[in-house]
């Protein structure tokens, strides 16, 4: 992979941004935000910051004290980021986690979560799916799921079912969102009823070859399956879904770009176009050794 934008010498007057995680060297964020900046005529730098959990709070504090404007936050720091933000957006409060930190004009740090917006835009705008009055199954009850339940419920599906290996965890998460719409939590083996319209894999297990133990009956010939994970080839979840006869199986490259675009809008006040960036990202990723 070529050196990311912002990895060289930085003009002290240039607005500074970055992504913080541990590890973070695999991140495509510098490439994506570099294209956003170019396409919108913005002057900024964007770098990778590998901070351990012990380093996270003081190093992020130093970044903003020294004039940093914003950070994307990835694993394992999203919950910690929510604790250091001065205030949270409604969607970050719902998620209980933050993937975007932004310095405000009054010197406070805003914590936001753009994951749900990114997923919804990819599903609805890029893929043309209709969520209203559709049945949605989300596999997994971790942080990835928590970040997307509220935005999905806002689209008024007939039902959102959260399925997890530990039923209690799924039920607890569903309870946290019950006032926002029809949502229930169940164990993997307890998923029942007709095939779902959309099945979303919000676990990272499929990247290691592990498949969630949900019954194949969740998938029908019109079911669209979406894996939040992404790679150069079909993920194991996608392969499984296609083998069950789903209508389409998609991985999360689009969500990656769309959530980044929403972060860029929060920081810069302008929404970048994503179609060409998504194409460029896939070309770069699939050609990388």
Image (cartoon, grey):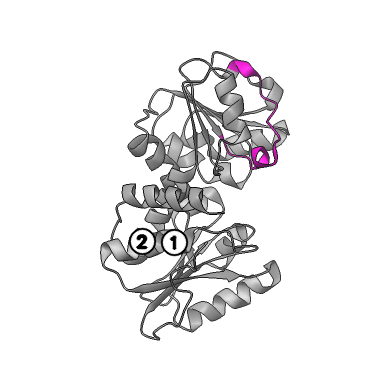
Q: Which mark is residue 20?
A: none
* Residue stretch in magenta: 201-217
Q: Is residue 62 magenta?
A: no
Q: Nearer the viewer, residue 202 or 7?
A: 7
CB under 8 Å between discs 1 and 2: yes
Does 88 appear above or below 189? below
Task: Give the residue at x 56% y 43%.
Answer: 229
Spatial distance from mark 1 to mark 2, Cα to Cα? 6 Å
Task: Give the residue at x 51% y 20%.
Answer: 246
**Quadrant in the picture for residue 45:** bottom left
Locate residue 147 relative to residue 122 in the image: left or right: right
Q: Give neighbour class at mark 1: few <14, some 14-19, many 20+ (Cα, 10 Å).
A: many
State the residue lying farthest toward the left.
Answer: 41
Locate residue 197 relative to residue 210 in the image: left or right: left
- Estimate the x, y position of residue 8 in percent, counting from the top left: 47, 79
**Quadrant in the picture for residue 244:** top right
- Estimate the x, y position of residue 26 in percent, counting from the top left: 58, 59
Task: Give the residue at x 43% y 23%.
Answer: 134
- Estimate the x, y position of residue 159 in percent, counting from the top left: 49, 25
Does 247 appear above or below 78? above
State the residue lying farthest toward the right.
Answer: 166
Which image quarter is the C terminus in?
Answer: bottom right
State the residue lying farthest toward the bottom.
Answer: 12
Q: Nearer the viewer, residue 126 or 64?
A: 126
Q: Dot 1 lies on which element? A: helix
Q: Dot 2 lies on which element? A: helix
Q: Is residue 210 magenta?
A: yes
Which residue is label 2 attached to?
35
Which residue is label 1 attached to?
31
């Amino acid at each position: 992979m070529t050196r990311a934008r912002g990895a060289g010498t930085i003009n002290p007057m240039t607005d500074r941004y970055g992504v913080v995680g541990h590890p973070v060297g695999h991140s495509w964020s510098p490439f994506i935000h570099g294209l956003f900046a170019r396409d919108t005529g913005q002057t900024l730098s964007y770098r990778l910051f590998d901070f351990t959990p012990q380093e996270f709070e003081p190093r992020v504090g130093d970044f903003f004290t020294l004039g940093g404007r914003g950070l994307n936050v990835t694993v394992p720091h999203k919950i910690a980021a929510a604790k250091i933000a001065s205030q949270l957006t409604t969607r970050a409060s719902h998620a209980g986690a933050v993937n975007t930190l932004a310095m405000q004009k009054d010197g406070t740090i805003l914590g936001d979560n753009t994951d749900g917006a990114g997923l919804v835009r990819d599903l609805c705008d890029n893929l043309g799916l209709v969520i209203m009055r559709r049945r949605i199954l989300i596999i997994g009850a971790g942080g990835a799921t928590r970040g997307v339940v509220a935005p999905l419920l806002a689209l008024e599906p007939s039902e959102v079912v959260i399925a997890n290996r530990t039923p209690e965890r799924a039920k607890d998460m569903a309870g946290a969102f019950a006032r926002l719409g029809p949502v229930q939590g169940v164990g993997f083996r307890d998923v029942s009823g007709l095939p779902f319209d959309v099945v979303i894999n919000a676990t990272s297990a499929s990247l290691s070859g592990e498949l969630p133990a949900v019954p194949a009956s969740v998938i029908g010939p019109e079911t669209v399956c979406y894996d939040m994970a992404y790679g150069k080839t079909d993920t194991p979840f996608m392969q499984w879904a296609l083998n069950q006869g789903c209508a389409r199986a998609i991985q999360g490259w689009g969500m990656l770009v769309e959530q980044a675009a929403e972060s860029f809008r929060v920081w810069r006040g302008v929404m970048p176009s994503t179609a060409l960036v998504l194409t460029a990202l896939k070309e770069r990723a699939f050609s990388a050794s």
